[in-house]
Image (tube, grey):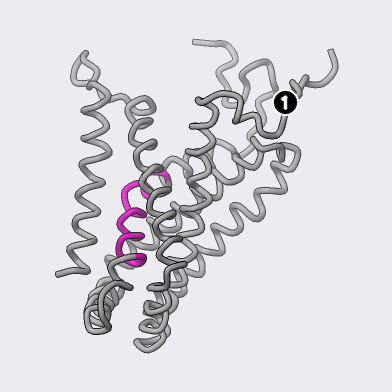
Amino acid sequence: MSGQYHRPHRWAWFLERPGYMRFMVRELTSFFVGGYLVVFLITLARLGGGEAAFAEWVAALASPGWMAAHIVALVAAVWHAVTWFAAVPQAMPIYLGEERLPAPIAAIVMGYGPWLTVTAVIVWWVLR
Amino acid sequence: MSAGGVSGGRGGRPARPSGEAFWWAVFSAGGVMAALFVPAFVIVTGFLLPSGDAAVAAERSAQFAAAAGWWPVKLVLLGVVSLSLFHCGHRIRHTLMDLGMRGASGLLKLPCYGGALAGSVWLGWVLWGI
């Protein structure tokens, strides 16, 4: 036996099954979340540049192009969160004695609950 | 208990530490951080700050600046954003490998993890100056 056998597959293998497609969409959220994080870094850097520089940057972010980009980023970030919280009960099952906490409850306790709390606190902080 | 229970030693392959376990741990931590925080960050910087008239934008910008200037928030931002960057770097690397770049898996570490490291260092420097 020599080496490893790699089954030939076409580049767009993820188009072959809906499950593969969902997997690829989930993985591709990382490109958009990563792109947004770069914009977030620039925003914080502008904040360090003083009030005028920051106001100029915020005004630029009001353009339709940036709005569209942020809608895409928000959809990607939310989809990342939803798929992540779906995976958490499988990766880290919680046991109460002998009973395994049902997956939907685990997703709420370890995912959606903290998520809504963090989001509410951050939004309240800026709007208050 | 399996006999070949050494990390990376499954499937009859030699147990050779590749560093992948470390990156998967960082990936998991960053995945949690990105899920919990990034949607709120997008709502704030993408929609709440640039919306409304100049007076509203100035008021919200002042709140944002005050929050980002408080040292506990700086520490949270540094932790959350750097872990999220490494999460994205790892996931982007593995997605590119799945799309046919498996031969370049080692080479991809440089832009993916190096970029996340550079972003984290830059953020630390930026937060230091706010």
Tell me where residue A36 appears, x and y as whole percent.
Answer: 46, 60
Residue B80 vertical placement versus B93 (above, below): below
- Would residue B42 appear left or right of A38 to someone viewing this image? left
Residue A100 vertical placement versus A65 (above, below): above
- Residue designated by label 1: A9
Residue B27 vertical placement versus A19 (above, below): below
- Would residue A106 appear left or right of B18 to someone viewing this image? left
Residue visible at 37% across and 77% down in the picture: A58
Tell me where residue A34 appears, x and y as whole percent.
Answer: 50, 55
Q: Amino acid at mark 1?
A: His
Residue visible at 70% across and 23% down in the picture: B14
**Mark 1 Cα shell of 10 Å, populated few (<14), some (14-19), many (≥20):** few
- Would residue B69 appear left or right of A113 to someone viewing this image? right
Quadrant for residue A123, please give it. Answer: bottom left
What range of the chain is rendered magenta?
B31-46
Please check the rendered image and state whether residue B43 is part of the magenta-colored stretch, yes or no. yes
Please check the rendered image and state whether residue B63 is part of the magenta-colored stretch, yes or no. no
Residue visible at 44% across and 76% down in the picture: A45
Q: Residue furthest left?
A: A128
Tell me where residue A125 appears, x and y as whole percent.
Answer: 19, 66
Quadrant of the image containing the C terminus of chain B = bottom left
Residue B61 vertical placement versus B86 (above, below): below
Q: Chain of mark 1?
A: A
Q: Residue furthest bottom?
A: A52
Residue visible at 59% across and 37% down in the picture: B20
Q: Residue furthest right?
A: A2
Tell me where residue A118 appears, x and y as whole percent.
Answer: 23, 53
Secondary structure at badge 1 equals loop
* Predominant SS along the magenta part: helix
